[in-house]
Image (cartoon, rainbow, N blue to C red):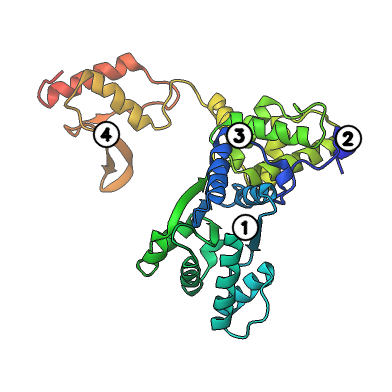
Amino acid sequence: MYREFFGLDDTPFTLTPDPRFIVFTPSYNEVLASLYYGLESAKGLIVLTGEVGTGKTTALRWILRRLDSSVLAAYVFNPRLSIDEFYHHVTQMLGLKGWNNKAELLSLMGKVLEERHRRGLRTVIIIDEAHELSDFVLEEIRLLLNFESDNAKHLQIVLTGQPELREKLNQPNLRQLKQRVALRCSMHAYPNVDEVERYITERLLIAGSNQPNVFTRDAVDLIFQCSEGIPRNINNICDNAMLTAYGAGMHKIGRKIVEEVAENLDLLPQGNPTSQSANAEQAPRGISSDPVEELWKAGQAGAAAIRPRMFKPDTDDGNIIGHRSVNAAGKPMREPDYFELDIDELERELESDSKEVGGFH
């Protein structure tokens, strides 16, 4: 909707894992390099973990596009499968036919994998959302890794999922599978505002923008805070911010628009810095929010032995008529005015009180 308004050829901030829009920031490059190395070196079992929306699927799709035709890949995107459904799905994607039971399937798969390896071809199974796999399917995956020769793996498997996948692999009943993990990679959120700014700018450039500085620095800073550096959240905020700016006829997106969008998406962090600074300007300077604490701090400078203030009810003929402050000796103290503290008078009163409880200064 806003593409023509901002001079774009494509939508830069979609929520789909489009590998065309991958951005090679320093933290992202490290993960991509590890994954690519693991697949090129036929490491066997690779585990990729990361929080929701950090770009795991995008990274895998980008790598698959760069593998040559010698690699046959099966991509399992729905992990909630029974053992039979899992094998049926994998064999369909690998083109294996003519089997009637599991024994025939494993025999056929072994022959096909061995022949492909002999010809210098590789076979990869990638399972997304692997933290949702049942323990039974994970055990079958471990057994599939037994397709190997003396010096090479005939089948590579990549498990990708949320951090819960690590916890799952630490279960005692899956310790054999854990020992088969040859490479672990972790996908993290962008660690600082500079990488977020680079991410936003480069996606705008990929989409055909001639002016990629659509977002002001203040706006990018707030996007980083609201998104917590997670690419999917960044995309969501930026897409809605550009739509809002288009509706308002604004070619530059500032902090105010981002704050409005983040609030609508329920992504505005608790204790928004903007609100905090406004409240700080309204509060009287030099005055504590707690007058008791203010008195106690002042008393520390003049009488180290004075205890924190206590409150004791005053009575008149047995009737409570109010509460007055008393010091450690039980002598009533004058209640301070919240906004006007006479420090000199306070110090004199504290000095007098300290003499009554032992003369300490």
From this viewpoint, is residue 274 visible? Answer: no
Report, in whole angstroms, how far the alpha carbon at label 1 lies from the one at label 2: 48 Å
Residue at the image point whose x is 54% and y is 45% from the top: 37
Residue at the image point whose x is 50% and y is 55% from the top: 47
Residue wearing tag 2: 5
Taking 281 as reference, is 137 above or below it? below
Q: Amino acid at mark 4?
A: Arg
Badge nearest the viewer, 3 or 1: 1
Report, in whole angstroms, how far the alpha carbon at label 4 lies from the one at label 1: 81 Å
Q: Residue furthest left?
A: 358
Q: Nearer the viewer, residue 6 or 98?
A: 98
Badge nearest the viewer, 3 or 4: 3
Residue wearing tag 4: 309
24 relative position to 165: left or right:
right
Q: Which mark is residue 121?
A: 1
Q: Nearer the viewer, residue 67 or 234?
A: 67
First in sequence: mark 2 or mark 4? 2
First in sequence: mark 1 or mark 2? 2
CB of mark 3 within 8 Å of CB of mark 1? no
Crowd rating for badge 1 (residues with CA inside 10 Å; few <14, some 14–19, many 20+): some
The quarter of the image holding the C terminus is top left
Residue 101 horizontal/vertical position (percent): 58, 85
Residue 179 horizontal/vertical position (percent): 38, 60
Local SS, label 2: helix
CB of mark 3 within 8 Å of CB of mark 2? no
